[in-house]
Amino acid sequence: MNAKKICYSTDPKCTGYKSGTYLLSGKQLTPASNSSTSAYIELSDGVIINGAWIDFGNSFCNDNKTGYCGNFPVDINGPDKPNTIGKDIFYFKITKSGIYPHGGPYEINPLHKFPQACNTTSTSSNNGYACAAWVIYNENMDYLHCDDLGWGKKGKCK
């Protein structure tokens, strides 16, 4: 990883996302949830890895079924629009055994299951969080165009 810039919310030179961030449904996140309020690393290719939360002492982390110890978003085109979770921002979870994309076929967390949390019509406050695994495993973003996709079902619109 070649970090071009490391920013903190207290640094006036690092303003974060000026236009805000959005859920897949188009709803804008509140400023408290916005990426401009946290630390981030901008890589030399423009990718931004936003501040992560990690808590190896939480009950989820110590549960052998979930093993969910934290997460972090990756914005593949930096501060450029659309700044939308599930379009250019993708979430990854931290476990004791590694880092995995949210929303995979074995996702335990009901808030991050595909298609419930990767659906353009969902009103969930986590809408878009489950798209990372779909993009990686199926190599498409067809969930933006059709709503009958799912693990063990259709993997493409056509």
Image (cartoon, grey):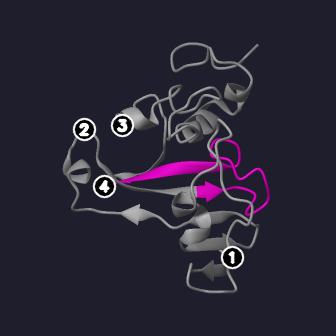
Q: Nearer the viewer, mark 1 or mark 4?
A: 1
Of residues 8 and 107, the one drawn nearer to the viewer in this rendering: 8
Does 36 appear above or below 97? below
Question: Does 101 appear in magenta?
Answer: no
The residue pinned by badge 3 equals 109
Instruction: Give me the C-alpha separation between circle 1 and circle 4.
Output: 33 Å
Q: Which mark is residue 96?
A: 4
Tell which circle, 2 or 1, labels the residue nearer the N-terminal end: 1
Tell which circle, 1 or 4, labels the residue nearer the N-terminal end: 1
The residue pinned by badge 1 equals 15
Does 146 appear above or below 27? above
Q: Which mark is residue 133?
A: none
The residue carrying pointer 1 sits among few (fewer than 14), some (14 to 19) or many (20 or more) residues within 10 Å by Cα, namely some
Question: Does 90 appear in magenta?
Answer: yes
Instruction: Give me the C-alpha separation between circle 3 and circle 4.
Output: 16 Å
Amino acid type, label 2:
Lys
Does 51 appear above or below 22? below
Q: Are marks 1 and 4 in contact (CB under 8 Å)?
A: no
Of residues 134 and 38, the one drawn nearer to the viewer in this rendering: 38
Name of the residue lying farthest toward the right? 80
Residue at image position (70%, 63%) is 47
Q: Are marks 3 and 4 in contact (CB under 8 Å)?
A: no
Secondary structure beneath dot 2 equals: loop
Magenta residues (range)? 74-95
The residue carrying pointer 2 sits among few (fewer than 14), some (14 to 19) or many (20 or more) residues within 10 Å by Cα, namely few
Secondary structure beneath dot 1 equals: loop
Residue 1 in sight: no
